[in-house]
Amino acid sequence: MHTTVFDVAVIGAGPGGSAAAYYLARQGKKVLLMDKASFPRDKTCGDGLTPRALDVLDDMGILAQAEAAGYRVNGLSVFAKRGAVLQSTIPKHPSLHDYLLVVPRLRLDDIVRRKALEQGVTFQGDTRVTGLTPHADGVDIHVQASGGPDTYRAQMAVVAAGANMSFLREIGILRHTPRPIVAVRAYYEGLQGLGDHIQAHFEQVPMPGYGWVFPTGKDSANIGLGMWRDQASAPESLRAALAHFLQAPRMQALLQNATQVGAVKSYPLRIDFTTAPTFGERVLLVGESAGLVSPLTGEGIDFALETGKLAAEFLHGVFAHGDFSRAVLAGYDRLLRSHFQSMFTFLGYLRKVYVNPLLMDRIIRLCERIPDVRHLFVSILLSQQHPAALLRPGILRKVLIGV
Ligand SMILES: Cc1cc2nc3c(=O)[nH]c(=O)nc-3n(C[C@H](O)[C@H](O)[C@H](O)COP(=O)(O)OP(=O)(O)OC[C@H]3O[C@@H](n4cnc5c(N)ncnc54)[C@H](O)[C@@H]3O)c2cc1C
């Protein structure tokens, strides 16, 4: 048992955990950040950063570093199943950036983690957390590290362990395993006609799901595919689906002289925030550990960064009052619900609609013709607008009757 008592132990040094650690340290808290990996480490991802994610990186003072490590993308294209194509710039928003970045996670996560370290956070890599024991004075964090089993002590724990559902079950947070979606990706070089848009493809992709091309440079990209379908969860069927998607004529044109760099990798995503637990005894959850991935697009880096910051702000009040009871921590759940519950509920509904090929084609064709529908749709895809905006009478009329 270590004698140092930390204010907060953060489990997982992805964007959610490192952001939480940074913001807590900025308040003067004594923070321990732990990860089972040694850094820098890769995380299987599409590497796309929405304007919401850029906003938090900017607030942390690391947007320029992320830009230098990544590739700036100025628009978005959607290729519907039945031939319609949407092309759009990133809609202007009063407070958000109007571009996207694609930053390989090997680089991004280390930039965020190093910023937390600069702020005074203690980091322990190669340290797998195996259990948490809450008690009257705090929480004991049991780990398996290179030197063997060990225990740390803190007043609070923040769990940012991503989609590691078995861990969340082991520590008693998850009572059942939510049904994740699954996604697969690989890096390619030597692409032709890539342009500076991120691309979402529905041609030759099993529904519900979509393929993506996220440029990492002028002629290189992260290319992948996500599937919402249960029977496709085996890695082999995912890889087969990716191979089929890459045979689509548009993809063949892009890939004709390209080479794959590194392995094809797959990983699950949790999209169950609306029913997910967000706290426990002496524990708050952030990012994907709270199921915070868009059910529409699969993006979750933005919500991980945002909830890292929100958890730190919430804990500021908890430490000020010195009451760590469940009744007080339930306020964190209310905070997250007030930010995300209705948005995620609507995104879930919208997914059911947009995976209908006929309806999707109709919406994309409307987007081609009517700029305000296009901007709204793209803003919703990027989580910049609440999807209920589609129900505004003026917009709904255009969607339903096309004028
Ligand atoms: C193929 C794919 C493509 C995606 N594309 C995008 C995209 O383009 N844009 C986007 O915004 N999102 C995307 N996502 C989702 C995004 O990757 C996640 O939502 C995001 O990484 C969540 O961040 P996080 O900090 O919550 O968790 P993570 O980034 O998963 O970090 C969790 C950390 O916890 C550590 N950990 C886990 N268990 C333990 C333990 N027991 N002890 C110690 N450490 C532990 C892990 O090693 C890891 O470092 C994609 C996901 C997949 C699978």
Image: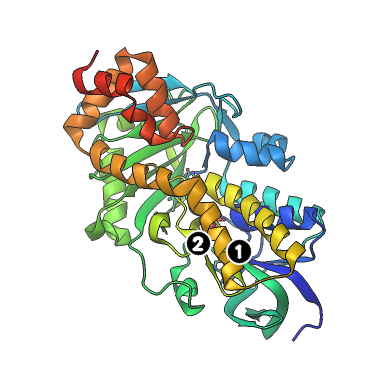
User: Is residue 321 visible in the rendered structure shown here?
Assistant: yes
Alpha carbon separation for disc pair 2 and 1: 10 Å
Residue shown at 58% from the left, 52% from the top: 307
Q: Position of residue 59 (x, y in %)?
A: 70, 39
Q: Are marks 2 and 1 in contact (CB under 8 Å)?
A: yes
Q: Secondary structure at mark 1?
A: loop
Query: Which amino acid does the dot numbered 1 rest on?
Result: Gly
Q: Position of residue 231 (x, y in %)?
A: 22, 59
The residue positioned farthest toward the left in the image shown: 358
User: Is residue 266 visible in the rendered structure shown here?
Assistant: no
Q: Is mark 2 within 8 Å of ligand 1?
A: yes
Q: Position of residue 290 (x, y in %)?
A: 49, 60
Q: Is mark 1 within 8 Å of ligand 1?
A: yes
Residue shown at 78% from the left, 57% from the top: 25
Of residues 295 and 192, the one nearer the viewer is 295
Query: Which amino acid does the dot numbered 2 rest on?
Result: Ser
Side of 277 relative to 34 (left or right)? left
Of residues 246 and 266, the one nearer the viewer is 266
Which residue is denoted by mark 1 in the rendering? 12
Residue shown at 42% from the left, 20% from the top: 88
Q: Quadrant of residue 30?
A: bottom right
Tag in front: 2 or 1 = 2
Q: Quadrant of the N terminus?
A: bottom right
Q: Quadrant of residue 96?
A: top right
Mark 1 closeness class: few <14, some 14–19, many ≥20 residues within 10 Å: many
Q: Quadrant of the C terminus?
A: top left
Of residues 223 and 176, the one nearer the viewer is 176
- Which label belongs to residue 289? 2
